[in-house]
Image (spheres, rainbow, N blue to C red):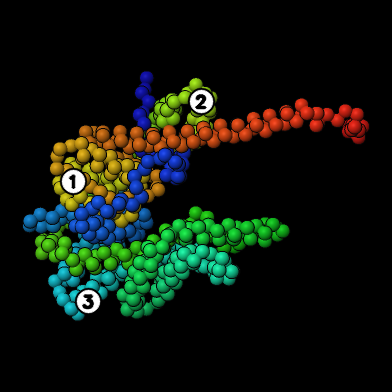
Amino acid sequence: MTLAAPITPPVATIILSSLSRNPGAYDGVNLPPRETPKADFDPDTRKLAKILDAIASFLPTTPRAGLSYAVTLRVTSTSSHITVAGNDVEHFEPDSEGRHPEALINAIWSKMRGICTSEGDERKRHMEDLLIFLFKTHMDKMRARYQKGDEICRIFFSVLDSSDAWNKLPKDTIKILEIAQKIHSASTKFFALSDNIEAYMAAFHQSLIRSQRDYNSKNADDLSLAYIAMYEKLAEEQFETTKGAVGSTDNEQRRRPGKRFSLDRYMGKLVSPAVHALSLLSVADGSLFRRVQHLPLSIAVIHPARSSSFKIPFPDQAAIRSFLEDAYGDEDLSEETDVRALVIDERLLAIGPKLAGHKQLNGPHCECFLINHHHTLQDVPYPYIGVSKLSCLQCGLYAEAYQKYVKQQTSSLPLFRTRGCGADIVPYLLPSASTAMGTFIEEHIISAIKQVVGVILRSDAAEKRAHWRKLSQSSAASSDSQDSGEYHFEGNIRADIFP
Ligand SMILES: [Zn+2]
């Protein structure tokens, strides 16, 4: 007899992803915050967070897209030490100029040192030198990001410009739209340059930073609302024009921007290299860096295990069913039994194929791999893990669990924080679970996901009950009217035309 595999964090994550793309949208769901609040960081940690996030974001990600990094810094009285981990990589891919993370960090560090130790015009020159270096090494990625949303953005603004839609919008929405348009058009001009591009980098940087400041003072929700309103208007127009025609052409389809495109996120991507560059420039000029810049810097690059090599046994249907039942809970089961069973049966149908599609799992993501690395070595860097992008949900829960664990311990482990946790739901194998910390973290992730699953299932059930109530009310209404005789056509109707 074989024992069914248990529900592990990646399995719980796959179950959650089959239930909802956006679990945060459910009332009562308690997930790690999207952006870690920086208010409770001390000033040094706040600056450090900026440096480490910036360094992680400038590490080479070509030619493999989607590669992300985590970075920590440890400073002793005699040296500073940076540890870099990448997602799911065995060896790091060099960037387009053949540079590895180590060489890139060394170059950034020594240019920061140049700024820190010079004055006046010389310092200005060093600042420009660092900026140009960062933009140049990052150019392919910046251009690719710009191109991804360029067409949608152009359509969006041309629709706005050509209609009287602008005038109907609230003042605040117009303001943020104008800023967004400025960011997009500055980027368009910049990426259209074919030569002497370096000469424009500082001006481009300044324009993005100015716009970013204005942008941050506005409510980005206004932008999303304007985009959705336009999307719906366009969709309606397209429906009108294609209704009479014989089908629509591919071209027309392409001209319709995707509904899930987030203009706000796109703006973030356009300005973030400028913001990260500014972080490095200003930190290089400040007291924190002055204190560490004279120390020799060493860099260690660590590798999580290679992807696609983990085949794991998946739990059987009975184990998943009992996970869902457990998640649902059993309050008021007397009335609920039927609807609960129905909801669970329905959801089980969706989970099966989703699990079957994940025959293999990737290795640990860089941020939790790095936390585990420092914990294993009992190595104590600054308590911030810099990341090149927001963590996925499983990493967010990992970091949350780790903090809980450390707070329970009396050891001097650093209370690592990260940038925050996005909406991506990605299953992967956690770093070694065989330690006390590993077990604690696993249990935390599974129970946190179970709570979210419970909220989703109960909301399914509430929806079902509401639907049934509506149905039974309308059928009650129709039987009432039958009783009133409205459908009794005695003597008044001719049935002889029917065969
Ligand atoms: Zn992750």
Whole-Å distance between the Cαs marked 3 and 1?
37 Å
Residue 22 seen from this side = yes
Residue at the disc numbered 1:
414
**Amino acid at the residue labelled 1:** Pro
Near mark 3 (Cα within 10 A), the count class, few <14, some 14-19 or many ≥20, is few
Please identify, in this view, whether the residue under mark 2 or under mark 1 is nearer the observer: 2
**Viewed as shown, does residue 279 lie left or right of 272?**
left
Task: Name the one closer to the observer, 480 or 396.
Answer: 480
Whole-Å distance between the Cαs marked 3 and 2?
70 Å
Please identify, in this view, whether the residue under mark 3 or under mark 2 is nearer the observer: 2
The mark nearer the N terminus, 3 or 1, is 3
Asked which quadrant contains residue 69, the reply is bottom left
**Amino acid at the residue labelled 3:** Lys
Asked which quadrant contains residue 453, the reply is top left
Q: Quadrant of the C terminus?
A: top right
Residue at 45% of width from left, 57% of height from top? 221
Residue 329 at x, y percent in the picture: 42, 28
**Amino acid at the residue labelled 2:** Glu
Whole-Å distance between the Cαs marked 2 and 1?
46 Å
Residue at the disc numbered 3:
124
In the displayed structure, 148 sits above or below 468; it is below
Residue at the disc numbered 2:
336
State the SS at label 3: helix
Residue 305 seen from this side = no
State the SS at label 2: helix
Residue 286 at x, y percent in the picture: 18, 66
Q: Which mark is residue 349?
A: none
Residue 88 at x, y percent in the picture: 31, 48
